[in-house]
Image (tube, helix red, strand yellow):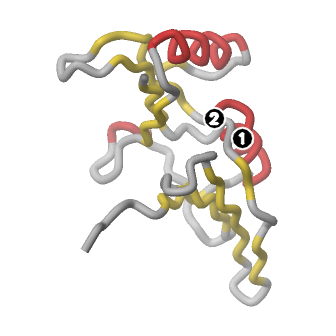
Amino acid sequence: MKAKIEHVAVWCNDLEQMKEFYMKYFDMSSNEKYINPVKNFESYFLSFNASDSAKIELMKRPDIIENSFTRGNLMGFCHLAISVGNRNSVDILTENLRSDGYKIIGEPRVTGDGFYESIVEDPEGNWVEITE
């Protein structure tokens, strides 16, 4: 058996805004919106250029309750880490996000476990680590 992560799913309030964020800043592409009117469910799958990489599924349903806590400090999943290739790209993307008004949670740095990364909030407050 050769296991791998196929996709990570995120409940969203604003699917279009979230889709545009990940497509713009992380060079992802999207499928056509899936709509299930019976379940009142909508979703997009976002993909990176590499054919074998994990996808992000953005999902929306009106009965999902809002999380009012700081996303990175809850039990369970903490963040999504996306590699952008090198330290310079981490720095540039972090500054682009800052200048576009996104909240920077952690400045670019080498962590204690040796990663070079920054942390930013996506439009709905989820933490995204930008790594080399």
Between 20 and 4, the residue placed more toward the observer is: 4
Which residue is pictured at 69% across the width and 18% down the height? 101
Name the quadrant containing residue 72.
Answer: top left
Residue 126 image offset from top left, x and y in percent: 51, 40
Q: How many numbered tags mark residues here?
A: 2
| Rendered image quadrant of residue 57 | bottom right
Residue at image x 59%, y 35%?
122
Amino acid type assigned to the residue bearing label 2 in the image? Phe
Q: Residue 131: image x %, image y %?
A: 42, 26
Which of 32/102 is in front?
A: 32
Label 2 element class: helix
The N terminus sits in image quarter: bottom left
Q: Secondary structure at mark 1?
A: helix
- The reply to whether callout 1 and callout 2 are in contact (CB within 8 Å) is yes
Q: Residue furthest left?
A: 112
| Residue 62 position (above or below residue 98) | below
From the image, which quarter does the C terminus lie in?
top left
- What residue is shown with label 1? 23
* Three-letter code for the amino acid on which mark 1 is drawn: Met
* Percent of width and height locating residue 39: 69, 85
Residue at numbered disc 2: 26
Residue 43: give x, y in percent of width and height: 69, 66
Q: Is residue 117 left or right of residue 102?
A: left
Crowdedness of circle 1 by 10 Å Cα count: few (<14), some, many (20+)?
A: some
What residue is at 79 percent from the left and 50 percent from the top? Answer: 16
